[in-house]
Image (spheres, grey):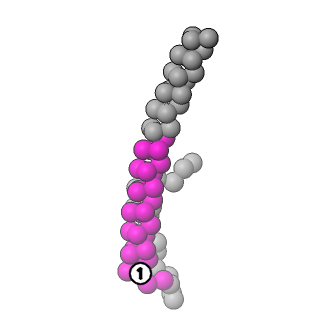
Amino acid sequence: MALTALEIKDKRFYVKFRGYDAKEVEEFQDMVYRDYEKLVRENHELETKISALEERLNYSRHVRGMAK
C-alpha cells in the first residue's frame, strides 16, 4: 500500500515517558507532508508529459512509416 500525503499529515504519535518533543515531531511531519505532496504533484505532471511525448513519438513513427 502506497503512503499518501494525507496519511503523513494525519499520523499522530503518542507521547511516552522520555518521548520525543511533540512540537518538533509535528513540525518535521508538516515539512515531510509538504515535500511529499509537492513530489507527488511533480511526478503526476511528469507522467502526463511522458504520455504526451510518447503519443507524439508514436504519431511521428506512424507518419514516417506511411511515407516509406
Instruction: Give above or below for 56 relative to 50.
Output: above
Toward the bottom, the furthest residue is: 18
Residue on which the image places disc 1: 24
Image spot of residue 31 (x, y percent): 40, 69
Residue 21 in magenta stretch: yes
Instruction: Give above or below for 59 relative to 27.
Output: above
Residue at 50% from the left image edge and 38% from the top image edge: 50
The 10 Å Cα crowd at callout 1, few under 14, some 14 to 19, many 20 or more, is: few
Residue in the foreground of this view, choosing between 37 and 47:
47
Q: Give the range drawn in magenta.
A: 20-47
Q: Which SS type dominates the magenta stretch? A: helix
Instruction: Give above or below for 25 relative to 5.
Output: below
Amino acid found under the numbered disc labelled 1: Glu
Image spot of residue 43 (x, y percent): 47, 48
One can see residue 34 in this view: yes
Quadrant of the image containing the C terminus:
top right
One can see residue 5 in this view: no
Residue in the foreground of this view, choosing between 58 and 41:
58
Left or right: 59, with 35 as reference point: right
Instruction: Give above or below for 21 relative to 60.
Output: below
Q: Element under label 1?
A: helix
Residue in the foreground of this view, choosing between 8 and 55:
55
Image spot of residue 26 (x, y percent): 39, 74
Residue at 45% from the left image edge and 39% from the top image edge: 49
Left or right: 68, with 12 as reference point: right
Image spot of residue 11 (x, y percent): 44, 64
Q: In which quarter of the image is residue 36?
A: bottom left
Left or right: 39, with 67 as reference point: left
Residue at 54% from the left image edge and 50% from the top image edge: 2
Q: In which quarter of the image is residue 24?
A: bottom left
Residue at 38% from the left image edge and 68% from the top image edge: 30
